[in-house]
């Protein structure tokens, strides 16, 4: 597979979470994993970056996962608790 070069493509993820159908168990598990893995790292000179993919945080995957969890009724505290790193780079 060839490497993609150039600017990051624009992704329209503007649908509000309350406009989404209620997610099923598989979607919720996948979304929770996405939010946990695509957390922010604050030490970059140009601001927060995704720990997993390196794109500006919140990356597309994090936004998708968060939107699914909000549609399922998760609170901000529950979503924030998914970031269980013990340090910045763990």
Image (cartoon, helix red, strand yellow):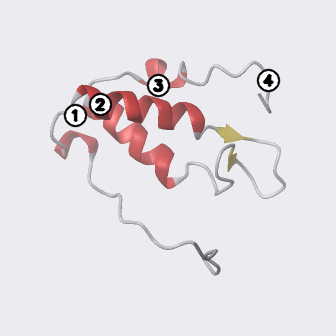
Q: Given contact means CB atoms under 8 Å apart, are the residues at marks 1 and 4 in contact?
A: no
x, y percent for residue 57:
61, 50
Calculate the distance from the C-alpha at mark 2 to the C-alpha at mark 3: 17 Å
- Point out the frontmost of discs 3 and 1: 1
Disc 1 to disc 4, how far (Cα)? 31 Å
Please give the residue where the numbered disc 2 appears in the rendered image: 26
Badge 1 density bin: few <14, some 14–19, many ≥20, Cα 10 Å? some
Real-space Cα separation, disc 1 to disc 2, in angstroms:
8 Å
Please state if 68 lies on the left or on the right of 90 as rendered: left
Q: Is residue 70 visible?
A: no
Of label 2 and label 3, which has the lower sequence position? 2
Residue 36 vertical position relative to residue 58 in the rendered view, above or below:
above
Q: What's the residue at 44%, 29% (across, down)?
A: 32
The quadrant of the picture occupied by the N terminus is bottom right
Vertical arrangement, residue 33 with respect to residue 54, above or below: above
Question: Quarter of the image containing the C terminus?
Answer: top right
User: Distance of mark 3 from mark 4, alpha carbons?
Assistant: 18 Å
Q: Decide if residue 3 is on the left or right side of residue 79.
A: right
Sequence-first disc among 4 and 2: 2
Q: In x, y percent, where is residue 69?
A: 35, 31
- Residue 11 x, y percent position in the rendering: 41, 66
| Residue 23: image tag | 1
Residue position for label 3: 79
Residue to which mark 4 is pinned: 87
Local secondary structure at mark 4: loop
Q: Residue at x 26, y 34 (%)?
A: 71
Q: Residue at x 40, y 35 (%)?
A: 31
| Left or right of residue 11: residue 9 | right
Q: Is residue 49 visible?
A: yes
């Amino acid at each position: 597979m060839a490497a993609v070069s150039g600017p990051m493509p624009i992704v329209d993820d503007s649908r509000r979470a309350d406009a989404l159908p209620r997610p099923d168990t598989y979607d919720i598990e996948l979304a929770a994993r996405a939010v946990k893995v695509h957390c922010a790292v604050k030490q970059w000179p140009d601001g927060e970056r995704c720990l997993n993919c390196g794109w500006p945080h919140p990356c597309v995957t994090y936004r998708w996962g968060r939107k699914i969890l909000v549609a399922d009724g998760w609170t901000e505290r529950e979503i924030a608790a998914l970031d269980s790193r013990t340090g910045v780079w763990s």
